[in-house]
Image (cartoon, coloured by chain):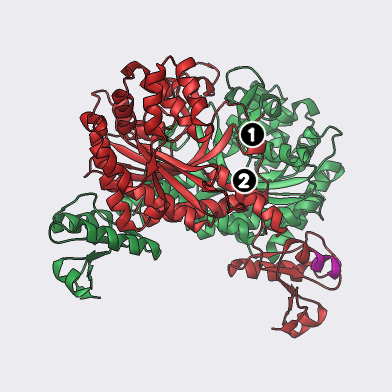
Chain colours: A green, B red
Amino acid sequence: QGTRDHPPASVALRDRLLAAAVACFKRHGAAAIDTPVLELRETLTGKYGEDTKLIYELQDQGGELLALRYDLTVPFARYLAMNKITHMKRYHVAKVYRRDNPATTRGRYREFYQCDFDIAGQFDPMIPDAECLKIVHEILSDLQLGDFLVKVNDRRILNGVFAACGVPESQFIAACSTVDKLDKMPWEDVKKEMVGEKGLSPEAADRIGEYVQLHGGLDLIERLLQDPKLSQNKLAKEGLGDMKLLFEYLTLFGITGKISFDLSLARGLDYYTGVIFEAVLLQQENDHVEEPASVGSVAGGGRYDGLVGMFDPKGRKVPCVGVSIGIERIFSILEQRVKASGQKVRTTETQVLVATPQKHLLAARLKLISELWDAGIKAEMLYKKDPKLLKQLQYCEDTGIPLAAIIGEQELTDGVIKLRDVATREEVRM
Amino acid sequence: QGTRDHPPASVALRDRLLAAAVACFKRHGAAAIDTPVLELRETLTGKYGEDTKLIYELQDQGGELLALRYDLTVPFARYLAMNKITHMKRYHVAKVYRRDNPATTRGRYREFYQCDFDIAGQFDPMIPDAECLKIVHEILSDLQLGDFLVKVNDRRILNGVFAACGVPESQFIAACSTVDKLDKMPWEDVKKEMVGEKGLSPEAADRIGEYVQLHGGLDLIERLLQDPKLSQNKLAKEGLGDMKLLFEYLTLFGITGKISFDLSLARGLDYYTGVIFEAVLLQQENDHVEEPASVGSVAGGGRYDGLVGMFDPKGRKVPCVGVSIGIERIFSILEQRVKASGQKVRTTETQVLVATPQKHLLAARLKLISELWDAGIKAEMLYKKDPKLLKQLQYCEDTGIPLAAIIGEQELTDGVIKLRDVATREEVRM
């Protein structure tokens, strides 16, 4: 339940998609690592908040208590701590597992690919963070998914807002997860949840509302830096200062046009400590809508400076920032597009079919195809002793093989083959 | 326990290895599929004989009873049956799981990659089987692992031998698994096990011994076809007839030099029904040894005509033949070679480091690197505002980056960059 087999057409499409992401990661100098699908249960415990219940556990068959990995970030942090690595730029493309309620029609599965790029190490502020956003921009542009927007915020700014609005620190996480719903429901409903379910005072909620509905660019950052309440808060000031620096770097990268500083962005995971971001595709059909509605997140990430330290016996921290490309959602979009276009995806790369027009020529076919394989040419033949020529050509048309190398009695005598272009039916002897 | 993280150097080496195998599979017209790591427990039950106890089971957390896949063959058979596919040429590279006693020094792990190519469908005899052997030959030659030998046998011939030697059918499987040990122990010990542990009569064991120590080529096949006892047995006759055909096809492929018809080859798995084969690397150091000792199996496979039918509600059979490349063992061999050679494996592909020789030039670096990335050039920079030039060049040497694009105040004024060859220290302005 909630998993699926990937037939050849899906694998071919996903391979193209992953190749684009991996090419970008390599362009940015990342190395690949691979970790086991299995992790010790204790490694995953306490990293995912209330989602811990979604972790797949293995039967206790003697030995260690194991679980299937839930994401690639926690295994990466464990890897860094275990190997005492203090700086690394790595990517990792692999499957993760969540015992979630599957919504397979919306592309949500219990087994799915993640595609992560992370930069670990103590560096000058915001340079690696800016690179992560550049990477999101490059990949989404490359894939030609249509217009997109990358929302950026900082956990320190959010926490500063909560503090400035009179929320006690113990309620930060609750407030955070409610704010995160602003992209799906109007402020009035979010306020209702804050007051009704999370126990914030209506006044605090109203004050929060004034901040979290703001979004903009450098101008907004400057304005908030002057804000009498926020500028008093150490965390908020730090976050805003870094956000300003980030936007300066993004300006040099020439990508601020698609970046929005958005105070409503909160992101679910506990481990973020600084910059957070999320890319959404914008609806394209309706140009009259003033504020384009989002069609869902296709990439996300942020800074998590405390996670590696949780795995180090001495608590030594390795600051990290990373991005996860939402490969499954993008795959669903591309798959729908391919379907809509009626275009046929070739699932093999065969260049030539070795064919015979008469009987008793299997030996000739086997000899020829062997030569082609040895020369590195992608070749197939039908696994029949005496197939009809028509059947062989039909196979080419069905599977998209462009050429047929035909060897008949005459060709055998003359020491040549007849190379046929399947589409045009042109033939040359060679 | 029994799993491992793969650092960048391992991933880079494994990627090269897998690329060679996949290139071969594509050359032979195979399409890729992907199946979940999770299977229903009942799918795996009764497919692996006594190794069933090595299957990793998932905790019952409500819902289905799941297990981690043990190989890629059973999931492939399930996939064919579920989707009513009657012919397909597919490859699959993925991890499988066995709760085995890990012997990590000998490259045996609980999580490891398999790399499989299979041909499913009802075809004229031995043509797909011959192609599987051609594939083994191509991949092992490509990887330049040294001299190798592919042992070939047929389950029907083995069963015919047992029958002809007076073994009751109920003891075929037991006899089979003992014969399989002939590559690791002398005949005397194998005989002892047959008589002592498996309960065969000493006379039957002696008769078996006369057959299973034979190996050769077409000549041996011809001789056995005339053998008074074997030629009486229907199964053995069928198997020998097909073996003869197989060797004819392998002769046309020009690869019989590395193929040996070996009656001691039995292979462990229950599901084989016809041709079986196994490739071993031959020891190279000692040329005086008459019979080169094998250093372990690096590929194996065979025909399994009954497996798909086990998953079809009506028991409809789809004959299959396939090969699994022993990627982990080959990886260990190549890794040892790399280590022995002292050669350094680059783990990134970065072409150029963007560097600055003076302070206050971060903006120039960010602008230039952004242009390079957008032009598809693999580029890195240090995540420091004002790094020393020496440190930047040192980073190139450490990580193997061949070029440095240096942009200083003078270059900025002149609108050029200085491109430096890190190894030769040659510089050009451009």
Q: Which one is earlier in the sequence, the residue at label 2 or at label 1? A: 1
Q: Is residue B322 left or right of residue A263?
A: left
Closer to the observer: label 2 or label 1?
A: 2
Q: Chain of mark 2?
A: B
Quarter containing the C terminus of chain A: bottom left
User: Residue B190, which numbered label?
Assistant: none
The amino acid sitting under disc 1 is Thr
Magenta region, main secondary structure: helix
In which quadrant will I find the N terminus of chain A?
top left
Residue B36 visible here? yes
Residue B190, image x, y percentages: 49, 26
Identity of the amino acid at label 2? Ser
Magenta highlight on residue B390: yes
The magenta segment: B388-394
Question: Vertically, is B20 above or below B36?
Answer: below
Q: Nearer the viewer, residue A299 or B120?
A: B120
Q: Chain of mark 1?
A: B
Q: Which residue appears at 53% of the width and 16% of the height? A: B60
The reply to whether residue B273 is in sight is no
Q: Which residue is mark 1?
A: B3
Instruction: Give the percent coordinates (x, y) of residue A220.
Output: 71, 53
> Helix, strand, or loop for circle 1?
loop
Residue B50, how many percent across, how many down? 47, 20
Mark 2 — residue? B332
- Mark 2 and mark 1: span between their CA atoms? 15 Å
Left or right of A37 on screen, residue B415: right
Say which residue appears at 34% left-offset and 30% top-offset. Answer: B158
Give the image location of residue B166, x and y in percent: 31, 20
Along the line of sight, the residue nearer the viewer: B349 or B233: B233
